[in-house]
């Protein structure tokens, strides 16, 4: 915006440097934090007073402790890489400076969210990222975007693509779903203030133990409602797949690595409230596990590569919630999965963006195949992320996912159910992710005539490589060398509390084998179906009855649409007709009509005829005389 | 009962029904001229009543002024305007007639109720003392002493009426 | 049986009522006027009766004045009636309804 056109080309670099600088600062602050002993790693910065109202005093207080440091590092680090990538991806877009300014606004809001010391400042960041999500998803508001037809080639003659979408409805859907969650956040804040008298984290968490169980449950569930909106869990997850209408870097940053993790962070931050309510923890656990399974099933039926990854994100977020719902044994696992997921999911999205970039922005997996020779860097980096997400031993995803599942198993009770669902879903995850990579990079070539898939420029491939490396080593690096959960867990203990005694390592290894084994099964099935010459389209057609619900996202969107659009529209029409037209307008018009008709009746008294007037006079006279004479 | 009272009774019994009948006839008859004539007869009956009530002067004035001048004036106007029978017999205003009759009866009842408070038992005083020197002289005495102002004002009123009639009667050029 | 003042007053009331009914029922303006005269005379009768009852002549003087005023009123009233009904062909009271509405 400054210096006009000449700077436009530099907009991306300026933005990237800003975020990279933030990362450097965060890193420095992180090392500073490490220089303190474990128990003293909390610093609170009392900021400028925002407002005071009655007993409530809210200021822009910030908090720097292990949890917020971890989130800040992840956010700024991944964001730097994605900014760099965007320079190449958005090279030809005429509004790219707006894009970068919004992207930076997003990072700023996210940092406010994770660094907050009280609920209201956190809410400020919460809303800020919601706004930026809306802006960025709707970035291409004036472009027609083609979307893969989920029923393409399922029936003879069904076309591959062209269910046209426009970005604005998707952006609105994202914002509205988030808004519903935000109501939960607001109500929770009201309740917190009403019962504890403050919104400051230290005060509230200190009192959390003293809350009545019902109150704690209410607060926790309301906060979790906000999480289902922001972190795309059932029932508010439906906006995330539609949000793929935004540019791919947006999907990578906001909808994979950072914004959607805000919900998990919220649960971790307010864990004392959740610990005060076993009911809330159970709810979070079940919703997380259920969503993981649901999303994995839907992902199997998608042909749009971004949609596959979107549902995968929803599913992996479910795992994170399983982790943080388990109490102290699961917090570190859930957060670890958050970190590793940020790496490999960002990589997968950026990789998908790279594939699209080299294929005329096509997202239909049916048009790919055999791309590994045309885009080698993209291929290898995506395979690294694939390994992480399916849980190939010693990759980062392996560590984090297995820790979550182990924690669930050890928790017992309802945790066992979550464990079982998690293991089964791991198998499904392996299947659909393998399907994704196999159909895209392996097998026969299915591109349309005239297309020349090519690799992306270095400004895009460098972030891919960095993320791929992180996806492979981060798990190992963060967890080994110290005790049970490793130094990652120990690092977070001051904030999240220490778990009770663990089972032995052998049992954990056994569990790990179960999950990994199932994952391997899934991958092999996908290999058989999609890599070897096999007419999987014919198979799909044969089983069309089973395939269709998966492709149609298990009809959840349709149900929502029925309730909100149809019923809501009917209700609105009913109210408009009966309450507004007949009721209110009727009352107003009725008053006017009443005045008019009474005037008309009164008018008939004025007949102009002398005799009727005389009659009136006589009548009155008789009455008066009678009254005077016959007065009781 | 004295003979005068007897005579009074007889005259009353003759004149009262006549007065009522002529009044009714005046109201009910279609022909306007008949109405006027019936009213004249009614006035004569009233004059008779006045005599019975020892108001001889007023009786004379009633005949001379009312029956002799006012009713003649009525008849003049009737002739002048050429009134025939009322053309439209059917009452156009619904409920007017029943309401009128009803209300008139109601008024009658109310007035009678008022009268019933005690007037029917009143003892009629004799006006002999008041009529000292004859009724005319007595009225003159009061009229020019106690009611002088009213008398003069009545005179003015008559002048005004006369002037008014002149103005109203003037044909516009 | 004597003729007491009550009888005259009753007669006066009857005549008055008849006059009132006549005012409301008749449509010919002049007949309406005549009914008014009837009412005035009924009142005169009651004045004279009360004069006899009270033993003074005030009632008779009042009746006299009523007659004077009635005469003046008739003069002016009939003048008005003539002035109005000269223009129109009918004397119906129902036709003067310009105050309608």
Image: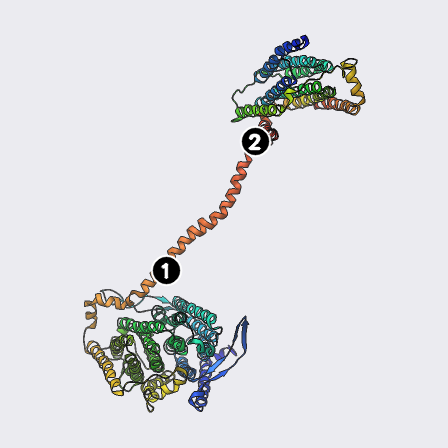
| Chain containing mark 1 | A
Q: Is residue A565 visible?
A: yes
Q: Cβ–Cβ below 8 Å for labels 2 and 1?
A: no
Do the residues marked 2 and 1 share a common chain? yes
In the rendered image, the residue lying farthest to the front is B1
Q: Please name the colour scheme applied to the rendered image.
A: rainbow
Look at the image and tell me in which quarter the C terminus of chain C lies: top right
Dot 1 lies on which element? helix
Q: Determine the image quadrant of residue C93.
A: top right
| Chain containing mark 2 | A
Q: Nearer the viewer, mark 2 or mark 1?
A: 2
Whether B42 is drawn above or below A449: the answer is above
The residue at which mark 2 appears reads as: A607
Dot 2 lies on which element? loop
Residue B44 horizontal side relative to residue A393, left or right: right
Disc ID at residue A565: 1
Position of residue A183 measured from the top left corner of the image (x, y, whole percent): 43, 67
In the rendered image, the residue lying farthest to the right is B145
Q: Pick the residue in front: A333 or C55.
A: C55
Residue A48 horizontal side relative to residue A81, left or right: right
């Amino acid at each position: 915006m400054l210096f006009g056109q000449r700077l436009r080309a530099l907009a991306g670099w300026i933005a990237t440097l800003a975020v990279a600088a933030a990362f450097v600062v965060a890193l420095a602050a992180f090392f500073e934090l490490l220089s303190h002993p474990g128990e003293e790693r909390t610093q609170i910065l009392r900021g400028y007073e925002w407002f005071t109202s009655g007993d409530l005093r809210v200021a822009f207080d910030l908090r720097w402790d292990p949890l917020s440091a971890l989130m800040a590092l992840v956010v700024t680090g991944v964001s730097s890489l994605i900014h760099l990538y965007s320079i190449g991806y958005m090279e030809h877009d005429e509004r790219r400076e707006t894009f970068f300014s919004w992207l930076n606004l997003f990072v700023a809001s996210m940092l406010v969210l994770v660094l907050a010391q009280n609920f209201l400042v956190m809410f400020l960041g919460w809303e800020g990222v919601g706004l930026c999500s809306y802006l960025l998803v709707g970035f291409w508001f004036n472009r027609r975007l083609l979307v893969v037809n989920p029923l393409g080639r399922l029936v003879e003659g069904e076309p591959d693509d062209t269910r046209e979408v426009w970005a604005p409805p998707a952006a609105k859907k994202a914002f509205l779903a988030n808004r519903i969650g935000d109501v939960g956040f607001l109500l929770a804040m009201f309740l917190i203030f009403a019962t504890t008298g403050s919104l400051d984290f230290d005060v509230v968490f200190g009192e959390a133990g003293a809350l009545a169980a019902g109150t704690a449950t209410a607060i926790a569930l309301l906060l979790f409602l906000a999480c289902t909106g922001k972190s795309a869990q059932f029932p508010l997850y439906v906006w995330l797949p539609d949000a793929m209408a935004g540019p791919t870097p947006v999907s990578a940053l906001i909808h994979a690595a950072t914004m959607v993790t805000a919900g998990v962070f919220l649960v971790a931050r307010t864990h004392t409230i959740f610990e005060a309510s076993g009911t809330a923890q159970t709810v979070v656990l079940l919703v997380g596990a259920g969503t993981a399974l649901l999303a994995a099933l839907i992902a199997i039926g998608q042909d749009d590569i971004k949609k596959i990854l979107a549902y995968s994100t929803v599913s992996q977020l479910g795992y994170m919630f399983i982790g943080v719902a388990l109490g102290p044994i699961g917090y570190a696992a859930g957060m670890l999965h958050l970190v590793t997921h940020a790496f490999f999911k960002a990589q997968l999205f950026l990789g998908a963006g790279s594939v699209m970039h080299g294929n005329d922005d096509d997202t239909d997996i049916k048009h790919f195949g055999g791309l590994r020779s045309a885009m080698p860097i993209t291929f290898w980096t995506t395979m690294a992320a694939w390994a992480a997400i399916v849980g190939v031993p010693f990759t980062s995803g392996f560590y984090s996912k297995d820790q979550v599942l182990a924690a669930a198993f050890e928790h017992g009770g309802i945790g066992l159910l979550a464990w079982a669902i998690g293991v089964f879903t791991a198998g499904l995850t392996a299947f659909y992710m393998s399907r994704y990579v196999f159909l895209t990079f392996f097998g026969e070539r299915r591109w349309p005539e005239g297309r020349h898939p090519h690799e992306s420029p270095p400004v895009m491939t460098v972030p891919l490589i960095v993320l791929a490396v992180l996806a492979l080593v981060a798990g190992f690096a963060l967890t080994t060398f110290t005790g049970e959960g490793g130094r990652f867990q120990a690092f977070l203990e001051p904030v999240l509390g220490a778990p009770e005694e663990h089972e032995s390592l052998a049992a954990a290894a056994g569990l790990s084998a179960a999950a990994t084994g199932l994952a391997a099964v899934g991958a092999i099935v996908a290999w058989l179906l999609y890599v070897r010459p096999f007419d999987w389209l014919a198979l799909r057609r044969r089983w069309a009855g089973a395939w269709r619900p998966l492709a149609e996202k298990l009809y959840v969107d349709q149900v929502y649409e029925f309730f909100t659009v149809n019923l809501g529209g009917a209700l609105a029409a009913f109210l408009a007709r009966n309450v507004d037209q007949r009721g209110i307008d009727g009352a107003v018009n009725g008053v006017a009509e009443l005045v008019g008709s009474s005037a008309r009746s009164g008018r008939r008294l004025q007949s102009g005829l002398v005799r009727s007037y005389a009659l009136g006079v006589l009548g009155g006279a008789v009455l008066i005389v009678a009254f005077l004479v016959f007065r009781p | 009962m004295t003979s005068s009272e007897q005579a009074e009774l007889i005259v009353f019994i003759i004149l009262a029904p006549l007065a009522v009948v002529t009044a009714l006839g005046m109201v009910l008859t279609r022909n306007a001229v008949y109405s006027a004539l019936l009213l004249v007869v009614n006035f004569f009956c009233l004059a008779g009543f006045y005599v019975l009530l020892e108001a001889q002067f007023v009786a004379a004035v009633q005949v001379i002024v009312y029956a002799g001048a006012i009713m003649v004036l009525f008849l003049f106007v009737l002739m002048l305007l050429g009134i025939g029978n009322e053309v439209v017999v059917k009452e156009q205003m619904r409920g007017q007639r029943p309401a009128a009759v009803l209300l008139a009866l109601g008024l009658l009842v109310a007035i009678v109720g008022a009268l019933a408070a005690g007037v029917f038992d009143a003892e009629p005083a004799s006006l002999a003392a008041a009529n000292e020197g004859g009724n005319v002289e007595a009225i003159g005495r009061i009229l020019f002493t106690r009611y002088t102002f009213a008398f003069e004002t009545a005179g003015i009123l008559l002048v005004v009426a006369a002037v008014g009639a002149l103005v109203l009667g003037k044909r516009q050029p | 049986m004597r003729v007491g003042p009550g009888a005259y007053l009753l007669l006066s009331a009857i005549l008055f009522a008849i006059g009132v009914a006549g005012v409301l029922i008749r449509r010919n303006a002049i007949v309406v006027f005549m009914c008014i005269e009837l009412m005035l005379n009924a009142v005169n009768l009651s004045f004279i009766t009360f004069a006899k009852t009270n033993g003074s002549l005030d009632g008779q003087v009042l009746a006299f004045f009523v007659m004077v005023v009635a005469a003046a009123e008739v003069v002016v009233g009939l003048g008005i009636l003539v002035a109005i009904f000269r223009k129109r062909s009918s004397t119906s009271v129902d036709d003067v309804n310009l105050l309608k509405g």
